[in-house]
Each structure stands twice: as structure tokens, then as C-alpha cells.
Image (cartoon, rainbow, N blue to C red):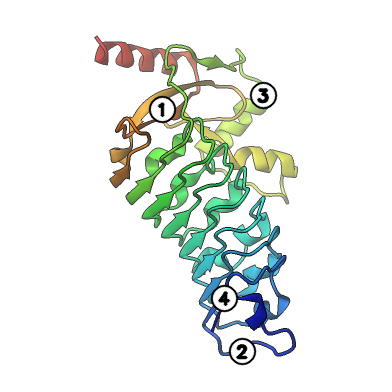
Amino acid sequence: MIITSKRDYPLTKNFPYSLEHLQASYCKLARVDMRMLCLKKLRKLDLSHNHIKKLPETIGDLVSLQELNLHNNHLESFCVALCNSTLQKSLQFLDLSQNKIKALPVQFCQLQELIHLKLDDNELIRLPFKIGQLSQLRFLSAARNKLPFLPNDFRNLSLEKLDLFGNPFEQPHPLVPSIQLKIPLTLLESAARATVNYRIPYGRHLLPSHLCEDLDVAKTCQCGSACLSCFIQTTVTMNLHHVAHTVVLVDNMGGTEAPIVCYFCSLTCYSQFLDRYLQSNR
């Protein structure tokens, strides 16, 4: 079913329960119609070019949904509940372009069936911390946002096409690190590192929720070890062809490089990185 004007939008009749594809664009919808959330066979939902500000958690109950198009709405966030829903197993295409989203939740990377993700023309100041966990992702576009650099996990992606044009990427400063180390390490930091490094199971039934959240976003040093709040951070240049077969130029100068964050768990690891960096730039 395709509806492309407010005049044609059904106000009294329900949508057919057998619908697999529904497009309701240019209908000036301010919210998602709850009648749509009863369509359990729906595979494609296109709500582009509306005025939607917030998504209901119950979209996650659409167990067959593979494609969700929310291009050109007024969204300011993508709720955590959707990341924890059945969309984890079904959603393959997601278009959030031309909205007002500043950041996506850490849990966003639980949508592990995503193949095509469009984030262009938002207000993103960062990409999801664990974006490298999206192992099925092949097409990523996040052009014309406010990204200063890419997360460390970005290097784990394996894309067919990548578009990051028009972001205000900062100049990398590998020799000017941000040092947030405490020596000796606090007991909390040591315990947290051990939990992640040795893959010790944890959960909210065992630990306070804020500690679980910290563990969920543990940083990874170049040596492979984890670090949480004690680390050295810097940025280096990465050629985007390392993660994508086709790369849209990041600027008008023909560049295909972007800054990526690097973390180090100790002074030793940073010193080793520094030695390699200086030798390669002689």
C-alpha cells in the first residue's frame, strides 16, 4: 500500500492485516500511527517525509520488519528499546537521514542484521562506540554531519560502500595525547579490566547498572587489552579503503582519509606505538 498525501491517508479504516509493504510519505504525520503496529507481516515500512519526532517502542514488535525508512522527519534520537527488540534479528535496512539526531545509543550496535544504514544530514557528533560489531553492514553513509573523528571500533567494519563526505574531521594529533591514566590503577579499574579481558560473565543481577554500562563500553588498547576510565587517547589517520571497497571522497580535495581514535592501556603501549609511528614517518 502506497500513500503519498495527507488527503489519501485513511482516518477511519484499519490497514489490511496482511500488508507486507506500507508507504505513508508526505502525510504530515506527527507520530507513528498505532494501527501500523498491528501489522505483524509487515516487512517494509516507509514513513519518510513526515513530521515524526519520536518512535514508539512498539515498533520493535513488528517481528517481520526488514526495512524501515524514516528519511526527512524530525527525529532527535533512536530509542534503546528498539535496539533491544526483535529488530535485532530482522532489520536489514534503516534510513535515518535528514533528521536531527545528535548521537545513537551504545545499544544501537545490537541491530546485527543491518546491511544498509543511512545517517546523512543529521547532527551526529559521534558514531556508535561499538560500530564494528555490525558485522553484516555493507553500506554506510553518514555524510554532512558533525563528526570530528571516527570511533576506534570503526576499523573492524567490512563495507562495500562508505560515504562520510562533508564532516568537519579534525586534524589527527598522534603526538599530543590525552592522558587519563592513574598509576597505580584503581582497584575498580583493575577489576573491570580483568572482567573484560577474561570474559567473566556479568549482568545487572550481579552488578549495579552503572558498572554494567561502563563494562559495555570498555575501550580496547592496541595490544588487545581492555581499559575503562584509565587510558591514553590520541587520534591517527586511517585510509578509509581499509574498511570499504568504494569510498566517497571525504572532502573537495579528493581525500579518502579520516581521523580515528586510538586507546592505550599503559604508558608502555603508547611508547611502543610512538616508536612505530616515528619510524614510519622518517
Q: Which sits earlier in the primary sequence, circle 1 or circle 3? A: 3
| Circle 2 SS class | loop
The residue identified by callout 1 is 222
Determine whether 36 is above or below 158 in the image: below
Label 4: state its secondary structure.
loop
Dot 1: what SS? loop
**Mark 1 residue crowding within 10 angstroms, few (<14) / some (14–19) / many (20+):** some
Nearest to the observer: residue 174 or residue 222: 174
Q: Nearer the viewer, mark 1 or mark 3?
A: 1
Q: Nearer the viewer, mark 1 or mark 4?
A: 4
Residue 4 is labelled as 4
**In whole angstroms, how far apart are the C-alphas of marks 3 and 2?**
56 Å
Question: How many angstroms separate mark 3 from mark 4 (CA)?
Answer: 59 Å
Mark 3: amino acid: Leu
Three-letter residue code for mark 4: Thr
Q: In the rendered image of this protein, does residue 107 appear above or below residue 11?
A: above
Which is more foreground, mark 1 or mark 2?
2
What numbered label is drawn on residue 187?
3
Q: CA distance from mark 1 to mark 3?
A: 22 Å
Q: Amino acid at mark 2?
A: Tyr
Q: Which element is circle 3 on?
A: helix
Residue drawn at (38%, 54%) of the image:
139
Mark 2 or mark 4, which has the lower sequence index? 4
Front disc: 3 or 4: 4
Q: Quadrant of the N terminus?
A: bottom right
Q: Look at the image and tell me whether residue 158 can be seen.
A: no
Q: Residue 129, how many percent across, how many down?
A: 53, 40
The first of marks 1 and 4 along the sequence is 4
Q: CA distance from mark 2 to mark 4?
A: 20 Å
Label 2 crowd bin: few (<14), some (14–19), many (20+), radius 10 Å:
few
Give how far apart the Cα atoms at labels 1 and 4 are. 51 Å
Distance between the alpha carbons at the discs numbered 1 and 2: 52 Å
